Amino acid sequence: MNRRVRSRVEGKGKEKVDFFEIDGNLTLDEKRVLDWTSLPDDTVITVFSHLNHLDRASLSSTCRTWRTLGKSPCLWQVLDLRTHKFDAAAASSIASRCENLRKIQFRGTESADAIINLRAKNLREISGDRCRKMTDITLCVLAARHEALECLQIGADFCEMISSDAIKAIAICCPQLRKLWFTGIREVDANAINALGKYCQNLTDIGFINCQRVDETALGNVVSVRFLSMAGTTYIQWDLVVQHWSKLPHLIGLDVSRTNIPPYTVSGFFSSSFSLKVLCALNCPALEEDATFVSNDNHKGKVLLAVFTDILTGVAKLCVGTPKNDRNIFLHWRNSKKDKKLGEILNWLEWIISDSLLRVSKRSLPNLDNFWLDQGTTLLLSLTQSAQEKVQERAATALATFVKKNYIIDTGRAEAVMRDDGIRILLNLAQSRREGLQSEAVKARFLAIAILSVNAKFAKAVTEEGGISILANLARSVNRLVAGEAALGLWNLSAGEDLEGAIEEAGGIKALVDLIFKWSSSIGGEVVLKRVVGALANLTADEKYSIEFASVGGVHALVTLARSCKAKGVQEQAARALTNFTSHGDTNYNAAAVGQETGALDALVQLIRSRHDGVRQEAAGALWNLSSDDRNQEAVAAAGGVEALVALAHSCSRGPMSRSSIHGIQETAAGALWGLSGSESNSIAIGREGGVVPLIALARSDAKEVHETAAGALWSLGLNPGNALRIVEEGGVPALVHLCSSSVSKMARFLSALALANMFDGRMDEVALIGTSTEGTSKSVDLKDARRMALQHIKAFVMTFSDPQLLSAAAASSASASLLQVTESVRIQLRCSGAEIGRLVAMLHNPSPMLKSCAAFALLQFTIPGVPHAAHHTSLLQSAGAPEVLRLAAAAAGDPLEAKIARIVLRNLEQQHRMESVV
């Protein structure tokens, strides 16, 4: 059994990998060891620049020379702390290097508290997110310690614990402030805003996003402001807004997106503000629902950006000399000679548009469907190419968000991404290293690629643009964010059967296995590991790629995870990968390889006892496949597998059978017990542990896959006379008779008939005199009636699928067409154990004509040339001395049904022997 699944959600070319040229005069010492300390200083600094701050500090401690170079001011001007835990201890360890720090990005209140310890007095820009618990005290100390601050942005979560007092303190402490953005403050009062106007004479960019109350009148006193954003802010008195804000002498851009601004306020601005050039009002219902306003395009020379206007055309009006029909005005401006003032406007527009589109994309508003298809996608793709990393991050995240509608890929939206060359753009950006290894923008781009790859059509488009090579290369990244998102993309792409070869050719299998070794012992690596193992589980479903997987150490990697990782998602995917890897071929070398790996079977048995259904199902599936190797059957039992699987079968057989989520566990639990029962000692142990009762319950399931597997397990268990009697005593005969006559599955009917035949071939009679219980007494059952009922339904089954005339013709002719006519009514593909084949051969000696016919019919199904496992069954039949027994059956007087079938089986064996000789 194997299954492929996707994650539960450039022009063709190779990745441009930065490398360093080593001085040609650099030599090895006598021991042929490279002396890294002799590298040129600029080369060492280049190496340092590609590391995160933790690795940079660690490497600096290796020697005195590198300690000096590691403190170079150029290495410590910008810090992105978002991808690592940053506390007071971490801050103290790098504080001595941060004298020249200019820009810092952080995540969480703990990091904000720690920044205070950096002693970075020359810090110019602070940007933080996920600061819901940040207090006035932290913010005030940050401001007091960094008087040279020019930019302060705290968001994008709500900052409910920050008050106007903190805003006022910032104004007093940071007089050089140019940009101030906050999200989700409850109230910004007049005192705070007037302080900004009084002390911060250079403050040109203000954003109070998603706030509740902001004093409109006081904002009219901040005369230096050029860009003002109030997006998402509520309780705004729009009459006061026009009255006071239209008089701001330098106001160029105003953002009122996601507010209830009325049409008359917009018109008032256009009429009364002489400096205003652009007003952004995305997702403002009062405007969008006013048909008169929407149709009126007389904006007094101002630019209105709304969902009902052509936004890119509007932006182009701000840029003199823009080519007509240029749909990427931002890119055109970036590639042309820049006007500084225009650059400020376009940078601001990129910032506020990306912020609003990201927030709107998360709400899945039905009235914006046309907007996303007509221009929203084009806008986002343009913004992913911004020079501002935060804009890239928002735009790519918005793409990944809006293509999913109600958690399902929206085909129309995804096609819009493809139509605008979005996949190539995202892939080109994904392999860019311009923004540094710690970039959240990289993660966002990969997320967009991975989300698109969930759909087979778009996965193909990603592949055609060279996406697999890019993802495989970036899966080798030392950065967990990059590696994790690349692995997610490969996971989704690997679900397509026609894409696996491309992943292998790109070195993706080795890259994924290497990631397991890289992150299996790292704290926080569970997300990466789940994606990696999910991709490998898909790839190992194909035998060709399972060979490559094994050759690069994949078996050891999976077993290591199964033994050591406690994360549910990783355990489930690791077990699924082992299930797929061990599902190939008759000899199943893969099953033997896993069984020989130290601790593999013990780990899977432990996973059977997991509290999580998905983990238990996949672990049972792996044990089912592993039991195809005889040595594994005993080893699994020694590891406690029989007890664990019987307990699992009991627990899932008592659950509500209509619950589809439990059917997978029921099937694999019964399948694993079936596989283990190939060993006589295991079969006896399963019976004694009480495994018969839950299997009979599962045989009554309405789910075809469940009752098929349960019938197979009962067939195999019934090879033991004691178990056969247990099945009768526990009411198994009526359940099997029902399947034999009424199941929609031919496989279930076939297996039920074989189970009944095993039980009533005469071997049980002696055991019935003793009983199966420890007290030596049997439950009261009428074996005579049970036998009569069983034989009656066995006969009905065999006669249903056996036409005597066709059998006679096939027995007399060697033509393949005759054999095809006999077997086309029921064709069973099943891999039998030696014990199961041996019992069928022995049954040909049984005095019951119907049991002999049933055994011959089964052997016919198992030896049809060309069907899976025919060669395996032929080998088992030769070992069991079947040819001689079959010849005796074929020569039976009166040419009964079993004689006709026996002659066909003999010819199948001969043909298989000829085929093997040719090979």
Image (cartoon, rainbow, N blue to C red):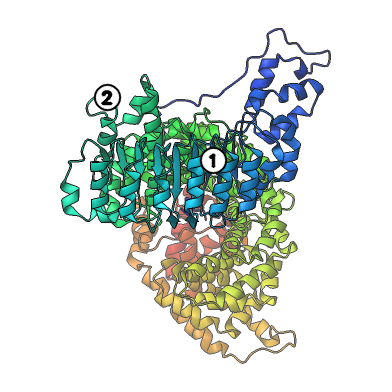
Percent position of residue 715, x then y: 56, 71
**Residue nearer the viewer, 792 or 415:** 415
Q: Is residue 238 visible?
A: yes
Percent position of residue 576, x then y: 57, 54
Q: Residue furthest top?
A: 25
Q: Secondary structure at mark 1?
A: strand
**Residue nearer the viewer, 382 or 641:** 382
Q: Which residue is mark 1?
A: 152
Instruction: Name which quarter of the figure residue 729 lies in.
Output: bottom right
**Residue nearer the viewer, 353 or 772:** 353
Q: Residue furthest bottom?
A: 780
Q: Amino acid at mark 2?
A: Val
From mark 1 to mark 2, how far is it between C-alphas? 32 Å
Q: Secondary structure at mark 2?
A: loop
Q: Which residue is at 48% across, 50% downward?
A: 183
Percent position of residue 173, x then y: 60, 41
Badge 1, how many Cα within 10 Å: few under 14, some, many 20+?
Answer: some
Please give left or right for residue 589 compared with residue 405 in the image: right
Residue 727 vertical position relative to residue 240 in the rendered view, above or below: below
Q: In this figure, what is the number of numbered marks? A: 2
CB atoms of marks 1 and 2 within 8 Å: no
Q: Amino acid at mark 1?
A: Leu
The numbered dot on residue 377 is none
**Residue nearer the viewer, 126 or 599:** 126
Badge 2, how many Cα within 10 Å: few under 14, some, many 20+?
Answer: few
Q: Is residue 449 visible?
A: no
Please give left or right for residue 831 compared with residue 254 in the image: right
Q: Which residue is at 49% across, 83% downward?
A: 734
Percent position of residue 566, x then y: 67, 56
Please give left or right for residue 4 compared with residue 135 in the image: left
Mark sitting earlier along the chain (1/2): 1
Q: Which residue is mark 2?
A: 320
